[in-house]
Image (cartoon, rainbow, N blue to C red):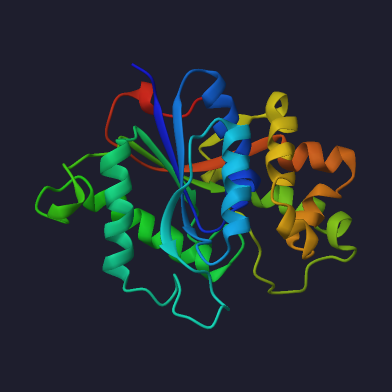
Amino acid sequence: MRLRLLCVHAHPDDEAIWTGGTLARYADEGATTAVVTCTGMENPRRVAELERSLEILGAGKPRLLGYPGSGYGVPGFLEAPFDEAVGRVVEHIREFRPDVVLTYDGYGAYGHPEHIRTHRVTLAAVEAAGYDQLYQDAGTAWRTRALYLVTVPRSLVLAQWQKVFGAPPEPGQAMLGIPDEEITTHLDVGPWVERKLAAMRAHESEIERGASLNMLLSLPDDLRALALGNEWYRRLSHTGPRESALSA
């Protein structure tokens, strides 16, 4: 049976940055993959770029949660009722029926409020989707077998911080990543890194506005290969057979 893998991300471009290698690798290995994106409805250009990125990664059509991002003068994903957002993700989970769900770690990978909210909404939705008593209008109950949180090992962050930012981290500064011993899964996605880069470059509007995407694309070759040619996860839960899990 083909593995079904669903990513839940906050913004168009996150699917490429954080899980692009995983999506491309598993699509090539015969899995059925898809991405739910929580924001982006306010900008048709970003939605079109997301569609191109997903095409490159083999992850189907965009699955939009329907919320605008923050900063657009209207209530967005952060302001949406929590149970409402959970219900929308539950609907996608029950429709797609994934074996594996991927989303950010508890810090949202690097502290972005919409990433943190995506983490919380996804964890609640993965659990709720398995109960036929909950969200009864959102489809037939489905219990996902494994949930993985995308992250990076803290040792890598500390080792490369000065090379990237030109100075050591400030004392007490909040750092992305988690302790190395909490990493449960490392995927070498080096053979798929060019596809990942192409998906990142598909988000032209983000590149034009000077987003953090530019920093990743302009890293020295060795550091870019390290940062983008590897993807790390913490496996949070597992209720099914080992075959449903990601494997190195």
Nearest the viewer among 128 and 43 is: 43
On the image, the x and y values in percent for residue 231 come to 62, 38
In the picture shown, does residue 169 fall above or below 188?
A: below
- Depicted 210 relative to depicted 123: above or below: below
Residue at left offset 48%, top offset 18%: 30
- For the point 78% across and 51% down, which residue is it? 216
**Of 150 and 204, the residue lying toward us:** 204
Q: Position of residue 132 (x, y in %)?
A: 11, 47
**Quarter of the figure with residue 101:** top left
Q: Quadrant of the N terminus?
A: top left
Q: How many marks?
A: 0
Q: Residue furthest bottom?
A: 73
149 vs 239: above or below: below
Asked if residue 134 lies left or right of residue 184, the reply is: left
Q: Residue at x 45, y 23 (%)?
A: 31
Q: Quadrant of the C terminus?
A: top right
- Front residue of this view, candidates 143 and 184: 143
Q: Is residue 135 left or right of residue 78?
A: left
Q: Is 136 left, or right, of 83 in this rendering?
A: left
Q: Is residue 152 visible?
A: no
x and y percentages locating residue 71 in the rendered image: 58, 78
Q: From where the camera sits, is residue 137 visible?
A: yes
Give the residue at the far left of this rendering. 133
Q: Is residue 180 above or below residue 57?
A: below
